């Protein structure tokens, strides 16, 4: 199955340093289905929500994680469409049970699987679509982006689980022909390749943090390590860089 006929990307009008071109909201719907599934309705912008609701009846709303650029409009969209909301975090759910890792869902005329992929946040998840012909697509939320790399939103996020999530996704991608549908940035053609690149990037960053600790001392602050490792980072994403450094320090000090 080519997932393109079943997946419509609707870009939210919230570009910025952390959101890239904006949040990617997705409408999932099998050809001929009278219902659809919306993943990450995004910011509370009426025109965006009405575009998401423009297809047939929305049967289900899924949230990949709790960050507001993905969830701010969820309650309003549920009220607009009458659809329940499901997420890993029970606090995000509305008229439905929390998602469970490995759960298979039938909605929008499609069958898909939910994978818990903690790391970026504790409640991060991916949606796995698999075709009869062996092809697949994975909606990755912020676990894998279409451009650049994501942050580890410490203390909610953690590096150890994130590395395990990337390994799980890479192993799935090695089956071949797995498209990445990210929460921000362009669609990517090769899940295994991008996960391998992310893992290599994380290993490189860990090496830089180790070098910074050698220079500054084992008890160096996250701020001081960030000054060395992310010296050229834009001021708009400095807090994100510091969060990732805290996650790396916690990982290194525990291992």
Image (cartoon, rainbow, N blue to C red):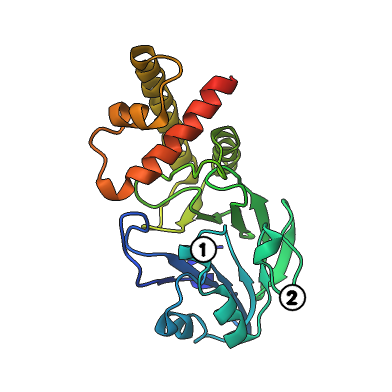
Residue 76, numbered label: none
Q: Using the rendered image of the protein, determine whether residue 26 is visible from the camera's viewpoint.
A: yes
Residue 128's place in the image compared with 229, above or below, is below
Q: Secondary structure at mark 1?
A: loop
Q: Secondary structure at mark 2?
A: loop
Question: Residue, x 32% and y 62% (percent of image)?
Answer: 21
Residue 112's place in the image compared with 96, above or below, is above
Residue 63: give x, y in percent of width and height: 59, 64
Asked if residue 194 lies left or right of residue 92, the reply is left
Task: Decide which of 72, 193 is in the foreground and name it.
Answer: 72
Question: Residue, x 36% and y 64% (percent of image)?
Answer: 22
Q: Residues within 10 Å of mark 1 (few under 14, many from 20)?
A: some
Q: Quadrant of the N terminus?
A: bottom right
Residue 254's place in the image compared with 135, above or below, is above
Which residue is identified by label 1?
A: 2
Q: Mark 1–mark 2 contact, CB under 8 Å?
A: no
Asked if residue 199 lies left or right of residue 157, the reply is left
Residue 67: give x, y in percent of width and height: 51, 59
Asked if residue 251 lies left or right of residue 227, the reply is right
Mark 1 or 2, which is nearer the eye? 2
Which residue is identified by label 2?
A: 95
Residue 146: give x, y in percent of width and height: 39, 52
């Amino acid at each position: 199955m080519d997932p393109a006929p079943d997946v419509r990307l609707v870009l939210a009008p919230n570009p910025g340093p952390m959101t890239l071109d904006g949040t990617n909201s997705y409408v999932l719907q099998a050809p001929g289905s009278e219902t659809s599934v919306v993943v990450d309705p995004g910011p509370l912008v009426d025109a965006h929500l009405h575009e998401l609701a423009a297809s047939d009846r929305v049967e289900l709303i899924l949230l990949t994680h709790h960050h507001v650029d993905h969830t701010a409009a969820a309650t309003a969209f549920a009220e607009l469409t009458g659809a329940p909301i499901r997420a890993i975090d029970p606090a995000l759910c509305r008229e439905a049970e929390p998602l469970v890792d490995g759960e298979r869902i039938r909605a929008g005329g499609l069958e898909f699987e939910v994978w818990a992929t903690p790391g970026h946040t504790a409640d991060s998840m991916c949606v796995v679509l698999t075709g009869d012909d062996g092809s697949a697509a994975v909606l990755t939320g912020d676990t894998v982006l279409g451009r650049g790399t994501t942050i580890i939103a410490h203390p909610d996020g953690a590096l150890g689980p994130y590395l395990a999530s990337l390994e799980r996704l890479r192993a799935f991608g090695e089956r071949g022909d797995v498209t990445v549908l990210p929460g921000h940035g362009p669609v990517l053609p090769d899940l295994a390749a991008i996960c391998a690149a992310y893992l290599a990037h994380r290993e490189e960053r860990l090496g830089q943090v180790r070098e910074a600790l050698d220079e500054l001392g084992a008890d160096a602050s996250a701020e001081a390590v960030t000054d060395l490792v992310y010296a050229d980072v834009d001021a708009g994403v400095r807090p994100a860089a510091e969060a990732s450094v805290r996650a790396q320090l916690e990982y290194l000090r525990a291992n």
